[in-house]
């Protein structure tokens, strides 16, 4: 005899569908909230550095250390055959015209004639390559004098700037509260250990009382100053590569990620081409801890 199976009520038949719909509804309801939690971070407001966007004059430049050296080098040669009897000055010594640099004894003569080798110029003893007691021949090189009435500046620059540095580029040396102007006269094409060498000369006057080997802080200017939108330099650019920045809300309670377009940079400022307006405030510190966040809550 067949058994009659009772038919389930309609609401039990559709129970699974109701449960599925409820789960989807919950997901849709809370998804924006969950997304918000994921894309925002809380930051201690005492740990952030805030800078203001402003309009000003911008110029691309770098600072490098340059070394002074004489433009003209004069060789010191032996007048006769003989023995070096005495060396009176060490390498690097300042010389005045007429100073006796060393004494040579001519051993070819029966009476051993003494010959004083003097400096014919004011300058610096760049090198001395003989020692007392050494025998030398007439015309042999004994050392060099660098004339200190005219100096050049040599600088090693990072290879990153190789395409931007050229002959005629201007530079400034500040010495004792006065600016001295230079121009790049020679760019050496060899790149060694990530650097290349340039040689600069003074355009007009040069500082007084400087010496060979003296180091100076040189400002190398890549272009002329122009009016631009500026943001102070900060560590944030290491994370964003200049493509976005966190902009502080007027309330000061949070900051929102915003896309920007950056131009040039110098040791003080970034040039902003798009995305910001004068008077807005931005976060300048590193974004490494919240690079994936869209919003920062300042607590």
Image (cartoon, rainbow, N blue to C red):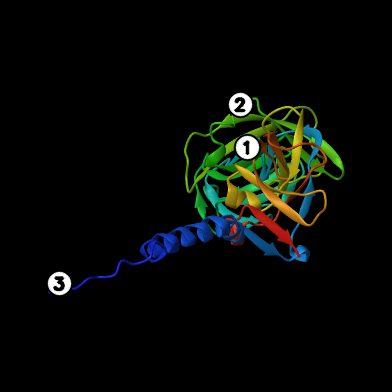
- Please report contact status of discs 3 and 2: CB closer than 8 Å, yes or no: no
Circle 3 — which element? loop
Report the disc number at residue 2: 3
Q: Disc 3 or 2, which lies upstream in sequence? A: 3
Residue nearest the observer in this picture, 118 or 252:
252
How far separated are the C-alphas under marks 1 and 2?
A: 23 Å
Relative to 113, residue 154 above or below: above
Q: Nearer the viewer, mark 3 or mark 2?
A: 3
Q: Disc 3 or 1, which lies upstream in sequence? A: 3
Report the disc number at residue 73: 1
How far separated are the C-alphas under marks 3 and 2?
A: 107 Å
Residue nearest the observer in this picture, 245 or 39:
39
The crowd level at tag 1 (other Cα within 10 Å; few <14, some 14-19, many 20+) is some
Image quadrant in which you'd find residue 276: top right
Report the disc number at residue 219: none
The quadrant of the image that shows the C terminus is bottom right
The quadrant of the image that shows the N terminus is bottom left
How far separated are the C-alphas under marks 3 and 1?
A: 123 Å
Q: Position of residue 223 (x, y in %)?
A: 69, 28
Circle 1 — which element? strand
Q: Nearer the viewer, mark 1 or mark 2?
A: 2
Residue that label 2 marks = 167
Circle 2 — which element? loop
């Amino acid at each position: 005899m067949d058994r009659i199976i009772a038919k389930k009520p309609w609401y039990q038949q559709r129970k699974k569908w109701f449960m599925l719909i409820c789960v989807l509804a919950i997901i849709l309801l809370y998804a924006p909230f969950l997304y918000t939690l994921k894309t925002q971070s809380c930051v201690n407001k005492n740990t952030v550095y805030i800078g203001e966007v402003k309009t000003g004059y911008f110029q691309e430049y770098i600072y490098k250390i340059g070394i002074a050296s004489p433009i003209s080098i004069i060789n010191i040669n032996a007048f006769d055959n003989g023995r070096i009897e005495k060396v009176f000055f060490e390498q690097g010594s300042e010389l005045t015209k007429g100073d006796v640099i060393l004494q040579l004894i001519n051993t070819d003569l029966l009476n051993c004639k003494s010959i004083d080798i003097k400096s014919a110029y004011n300058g610096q003893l760049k090198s001395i390559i003989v020692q007392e007691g050494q025998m030398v021949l007439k015309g042999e090189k004994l050392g060099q004098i660098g004339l200190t009435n005219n100096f050049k500046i040599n600088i090693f620059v990072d290879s990153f700037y190789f395409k931007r540095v050229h002959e005629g580029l201007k530079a400034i040396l500040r010495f004792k509260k006065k600016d001295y102007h230079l121009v790049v006269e020679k760019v050496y094409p060899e790149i060694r250990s990530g650097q290349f060498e340039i040689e600069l000369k003074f355009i007009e006057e040069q500082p007084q009382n400087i010496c060979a080997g003296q180091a100076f802080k040189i400002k190398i200017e890549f272009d002329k100053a122009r009016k631009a939108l500026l943001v102070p330099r900060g560590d944030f650019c290491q994370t964003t590569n200049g493509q976005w920045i966190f902009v502080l809300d007027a309330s000061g309670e949070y900051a929102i990620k915003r896309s920007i377009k950056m131009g040039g940079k110098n040791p003080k400022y970034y040039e902003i081409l798009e995305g910001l307006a004068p008077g807005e405030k931005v976060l300048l510190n590193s974004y490494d801890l919240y690079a994936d966040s869209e919003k920062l809550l300042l607590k």
